Amino acid sequence: MSKTKSTTDSDKVGSPAAGPTPSAGETTLTAEVTPAPGTEAGNASLPPLTPEEIAGLKAKAAKADENWDRYLRAVAELDNFKKRTARERQEAARTANEALLQKLIPVLDHLDMALAAADNASSPVADSLKTGFTMVGSQLRSLLAEAGLEEIEAAGQKFDPQLHEAVAHEESADVAEGGVLQQVRKGYRLRDRLLRPATVVVARKPSVPAA
């Protein structure tokens, strides 16, 4: 004869539902809450700074400011050094040929004198020499001009003590007083640097004859 299992109301209702029960071998973790900095609980764990510690922090801040100022000065000095070096390099490159040009200026003078002498001669030989001197002088002046040599034009200009050297004064009714009456020797400059002033004769007003 079979047995019938009866179920009571209390068995149906049962006890309140519980969470999953850890199985064998599992570990239950418990979270620990750490007070956040700035909270009352967090501040309670930080002791107040002592006067010595405050003084040390102030000293470190002052040292940091001093190091920052030194850094700014070093950067400024480095920038000035770079600019100065660049200017010096440009100046050195610009005037590198100055000594050589100074030595070549007398050669130009001699060529001019040779051309003047050839102009005064009238012979086939003199004409050939004049042609040769003209070609050499033209080529030499072209090369020197590429190097920065410039001839100072003085004839017909107003006397400029920065560019001209007066060797005499002569009366003239054709040239205004203070003007260059005659250029005795050519002047030269290397771009804006004067190498040799032009030697000139300066005009002055004719004297009024005594009555």
Image (cartoon, helix red, strand yellow):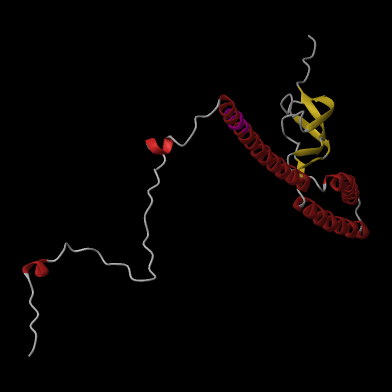
Q: Residue 88 at x, y = what percent?
A: 75, 42
Q: Residue at x 84, y 54 (%)?
A: 137
Quarter containing the N terminus:
bottom left
Quadrant of residue 13 in the image? Answer: bottom left
Q: Which residues are magenta?
A: 58-63
Q: Which of the pair 73/206 is nearer the observer?
A: 73
The one of 16 and 81 positioned closer to us in this rendering:
16
- Tell me residue 172's x, y (percent): 77, 26
Q: Where is residue 177 shown, x and y percent of the image? A: 73, 24
Write the residue at 63% across / 32% down: 63
* 39 left or right, relative to 203: left
Q: Quick check: is 59 in the magenta stretch?
A: yes
Q: How many marks?
A: 0
Does residue 17 lie above or below 119 as drawn? below
Q: Residue furthest bottom?
A: 1
Which quadrant of the rendered structure holds the C terminus?
top right
Left or right placement of residue 20 versus residue 189 in this view? left
Viewer can see residue 38: no
Return the x and y of residue 72 as percentages of the image width and height: 62, 36
Q: Quadrant of residue 123?
A: bottom right
Tell whether position 70 is magenta: no
Q: Is residue 180 rendered to the left or right of residue 126?
A: left
Snapshot quadrant of residue 99: top right
Image vertical order of residue 69 relative to residue 94, above or below: above
Q: Nearer the viewer, residue 37 or 32?
A: 32
Residue 139 makes an appearance in the image: yes
Furthest-front residue in view?
A: 1
The secondary structure making up most of the magenta span is helix
